[in-house]
Image (tube, coloured by chain):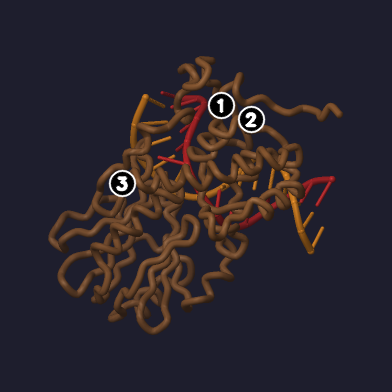
Chain colours: A brown, B red, C orange
Amino acid sequence: MPELPEVETVRRGLQKLVLGQKIARVEVLYPKMIVGDADDFKAKLTEQTLEKIERRGKYLLFRFTNGLTVVSHLRMEGKFYVKEATDPVDKHTHVIFDLADGRQLRYNDVRKFGRMQLVQTGSEEKLPGLAKLGPEPVAETFKVADFYQKLQKKKKNIKTALLDQTLVTGLGNIYVDEVLWQSKIHPETSCQKLTLDQATILHDNIITELAKAIKAGGTTIRSYTDAFQKTGAFQFELDVYGRTDEPCKRCGTKIQKIVVGQRGTHFCPHCQQVVKCHIF
DNA sequence: ACCCATGTTTACCC
DNA sequence: TGGGTAAACATGGG
């Protein structure tokens, strides 16, 4: 579910709901959710105030007083909700933050893939997941020249490379299929065979697509909701993802679904052709 | 019953 | 050592 636009939508919702709140107590119902010692996590966060919520790639960064940061990754199905303490607790709720005003910030995750970790603010950049992240997908940080140079060194297909978060951060399976379709690039194209023109088109499409998806509140395919338990609207704007056997919106050819790098991959066999060799 | 699923980390290989 | 790839994580839905 959550790729960058969904994580950003969650961040904005939480920012409105719980900013400035003091943590009265933390309950951890599924300790594996916490990287490190869950008791330590609970003890250190108690009585701290949430000052800011930031985001890096698909990671949420909860900034607390005393230089503490909770790094949270929602992975496939993680969600944050804000509930009254008296509301019934869902069976997939794994962490509960009691707020001083009587409400609770609850972390819910059907598949239990998500993780949360308490670190000293600033040191999150050294965590394995964050250390190798590429630039945020905005014009200020994501530069074509750098993107193209890195593509020249990658020995992978473009879809797998875009999913690994090192060229640029934030794309997941849905948006990768979308930006490759928009750019008329076959998902199995070798990175090294992309031209500077193709890299430029792809770069621009990545920036605009993710910005549009944020504006729409993200994409809900099966279960994504934001902090208000509201679904996104971008699923209505998808061009290829999930459109297997439906006509390509550009040329009418049936959209195909194949597997690339273990991931279901949608593309138009007419608009997106593999570059198999260079003819000089 | 079997296969699939929006993501990352780990183990293993070259 | 660095890069690439497949399995692992855990659960629900079609």
What's the residue type where badge 3 is placed? Thr
Label 3 to label 2, Cα distance in Å?
Answer: 31 Å
State the mark number for residue A267: 1
What secondary structure is found at the residue carrying circle 1?
A: strand
Disc 2 from disc 1: Cα separation = 7 Å
Image check: A200 left or right of A52? right
Mark number displayed over residue A228? none
Q: Residue at x 58, y 52 (%)?
A: A168
Give percent across and percent down for residue A119.
47, 75
Q: Which residue is mark 3?
A: A225
x, y percent for residue A167:
63, 52
Quadrant placement of the N terminus of chain A = top left
**Observer able to see residue A30:** yes
Q: How busy is the neighbourhood of tag 2: few (under 14 within 10 Å), some, or many (20 plus)?
A: many
Residue at (33% x, 75% y) in the render? A51
| Foreground pick, C2 / A30 | C2
Q: Which residue is mark 2?
A: A186
Q: Amino acid at mark 1?
A: Phe
Alpha carbon separation for disc pair 3 and 1 = 26 Å
Q: Image height check: is A93 above or below A221? A: below
Residue type beneath disc 2: His
